[in-house]
Amino acid sequence: MEQHEPASLETSEVVSSNTIEVSNEETPSLKTNSETSDELTRGFEATYMADANIREIANVSDEVKQEVEEIQEEQVHLKKLSWTQRLKLGLSKTRDVLGKKLLGVFGGGKIDEDLYEELESVLLTSDVGVAATMHLLENVRDKVSLRGLKDGAELKTALTDSLVELIKPLEVPLDTSNHQPFVIMMVGVNGAGKTTSIGKLAKYFQQQGKSVMLAAGDTFRAAAKEQLMEWGKRNNVTVIAQQSGDSAAVCYDAIQSAIARKIDIVLADTAGRLPTQLNLMEEIKKVKRVIDKALPGAPHEVMLVLDATIGQNAINQVKAFDDALGLTGLVLTKLDGTAKGGVICAIVKERPVALRFIGVGESIDDLRPFTAKEYVEALLD
Ligand SMILES: Nc1nc2c(ncn2[C@@H]2O[C@H](COP(=O)(O)OP(=O)(O)OP(=O)(O)O)[C@@H](O)[C@H]2O)c(=O)[nH]1
């Protein structure tokens, strides 16, 4: 008996606060002998309803508990996953669309013109882009004739190889060893994931044995400073911010401070802006100039954070920011929320800027350096 008490107590505590309310409303008071049997019946019915409500609430609270437990279990499970597993999980939406359609093509018998046509339409409808699709088709045809392939199933290896070759030029890991501090300026449109990526990168660089400082250069969005400070707290990293002041001044201060403290890497946040907002684009050019004034030659990396869910529109953003600032690297975020992972092929054909990191989720370990082979394998597995 006693062993069961804690469990039942817990349930009754949760239920009791709800019960009182329900029973006050529903339970009739037995006042005089003149009450009719109808009234008694209604009273019993009300009591029965109250009991039913209690049972329902208890069931709901059990369901909520179970859901919380399931989420917690999932989080523990996610933490245990390797990067390859996270990548596969993150790319599942793209794989479900592009990968499954391709599997349909590969399973389609002998290699002929119909099959190439099918392949072309799959690629064109998967954000790969026209130029990259044409390139891939030509490359696959070459491989098929060179290797003497006949069967659709053999096409998979040919396409895998062609895809890896196509996007390989974007695989240029960021080398931060030749400057101290190495200054990374993060740019992008609103909500692309700049601030979050800075938080994740801070941890990544720390794991590489580097000391990191953050500059709260997004002085436009009200909560951006606080958001960055939270990431700083989480990673035990200094954040340079100002009560008021502009982005350039914050970045200048941060660089001065990083030089004095011999910090390895400065990650500078900037406010989100659209390339069409000309005054804001002028402002960000000024931030870049001021960074160069604080440390000649800096920023050493101008990194555009791109939201993968926008698909082909990403190309326009790369072009516009590249024209204005001279991009040296890209971060592609939110690949987990989209089936448009094929956009990497379009980037390499339209405006090949080094894809430094890819993001496949919201957790701190979900951002890692991009490698072409790993990406294609996760996509077509
Ligand atoms: N699912 C998913 N969400 C992400 C990823 N990267 C960032 N996010 C989410 O995207 C949202 C916007 O991220 P922020 O870092 O605030 O974006 P920002 O570019 O700094 O936004 P502004 O300051 O408005 O310019 C947040 O809810 C992030 O958690 C990712 O790889 N996957």
Image (cartoon, rainbow, N blue to C red):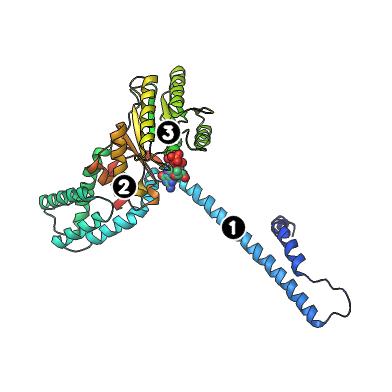
Nearer the observer, disc 3 or disc 1? 3
Q: Give SS at disc 3.
A: loop
Residue 110 against residue 277 in the figure, above or below = below
Amino acid type shown at disc 2: Asn
Nearer the observer, disc 2 or disc 1? 2
2 lies left or right of 255: right
Residue 365 against residue 296 in the figure, above or below = below
222 lies left or right of 55: left
Q: Nearer the viewer, residue 366 or 150?
A: 366
Label 2 lies in ligand 1 vicinity (Cβ under 8 Å): no
| Residue 375 placement: quadrant | top left
Cα separation, mark 2 vs mark 1, equals 40 Å
Label 1 Cα neighbours within 10 Å, binned few <14 / some 14-19 / many ≥20: few
Q: Nearer the viewer, residue 340 or 314?
A: 314
Q: Position of residue 262 (x, y in %)?
A: 44, 19
| Residue 374 placement: quadrant | top left
Q: Give SS at disc 2.
A: helix
Residue at label 1?
Answer: 64
Say which residue appears at 20% left-offset and 56% top-offset. 120
Label 3 Cα neighbours within 10 Å, binned few <14 / some 14-19 / many ≥20: many
Amino acid type shown at disc 3: Thr
Q: Which mark is residue 313?
A: 2
Amino acid type shown at disc 1: Val
Residue 214 against residue 61 in the figure, above or below = above
Label 2 Cα neighbours within 10 Å, binned few <14 / some 14-19 / many ≥20: some
Q: Which mark is residue 270?
A: 3
